[in-house]
Image: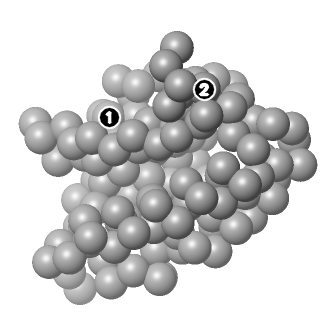
Amino acid sequence: MDSETQQGDTKLFYLNIFDIYVLDYAGTITLDKGLSNMALIENELRELSLNRVCLKILFDLSNTIWENRNTHDELSKIARKIFNPQNFDLVIYTAILNNEITGPTFDNEHWFINKDDAIKWLTEKTYTEH
């Protein structure tokens, strides 16, 4: 495990064939590290959202270790406010890959334990303007 992963950093890469951005969130996440990562992710999403009507994101938490439950819950509350799709001028679909939860959270968010299922769900999402 490299030091970047141990510190709990985020890596962003693009699955061109599927038009999906992957946020790989691995390592140990403290509250401070999580807040720092959130700022970086928000900036990335703002850049990626330029000139787009739809953004598909696979948020991989399968190798994330939370400092404690309180850290997870606090960061989750903050993230839901920052990354609320209404804060962006486009539609965002998010598949969250993890090790224990499956099912929809919102119309635009679904949790998966299998990466292939997450990619399939995202590729089925299409945006049509009303």
Q: Is residue 93 left or right of residue 18?
A: right
Look at mark 2 in the image and give the residue it sits on.
Answer: 6
Look at mark 1 in the image and give the residue it sits on.
Answer: 119
Residue 43 is situated, as x and y percent measured from the top left of the image, at 39, 69
Label 2: element kind: helix
Residue 111 is situated, as x and y percent measured from the top left of the image, at 56, 40
- Answer with the quarter of the image where residue 22 lies: top left
**Which amino acid lies under the numbered mark 2 shown in the image of this protein?**
Gln
Label 1: element kind: helix
Count every numbered label the image shows and give the total.
2
Q: Earlier in the sequence, mark 2 or mark 1?
A: 2
Q: Residue at x 89, y 49 (%)?
A: 70
Please rate how many residues cluster around mark 2, counting C-alpha atoms within 10 Å: few if below 14, some from 14 to 19, many from 20. some
Q: CA distance from mark 2 to mark 1?
A: 26 Å
Residue 31 is situated, as x and y percent measured from the top left of the image, at 76, 52
Scheme of image coloration: one colour
Vertical position of residue 24 compared to residue 48: above or below: above
Vertical position of residue 1 compared to residue 40: above or below: above
Residue 28 is situated, as x and y percent measured from the top left of the image, at 68, 32
Q: Is residue 87 visible?
A: yes
> 27 or 126, which lies in front?
27
**Which amino acid lies under the numbered mark 1 shown in the image of this protein?**
Ile
Q: Residue at x 52, y 66 (%)?
A: 39
- Answer with the quarter of the image where residue 52 lies: bottom left
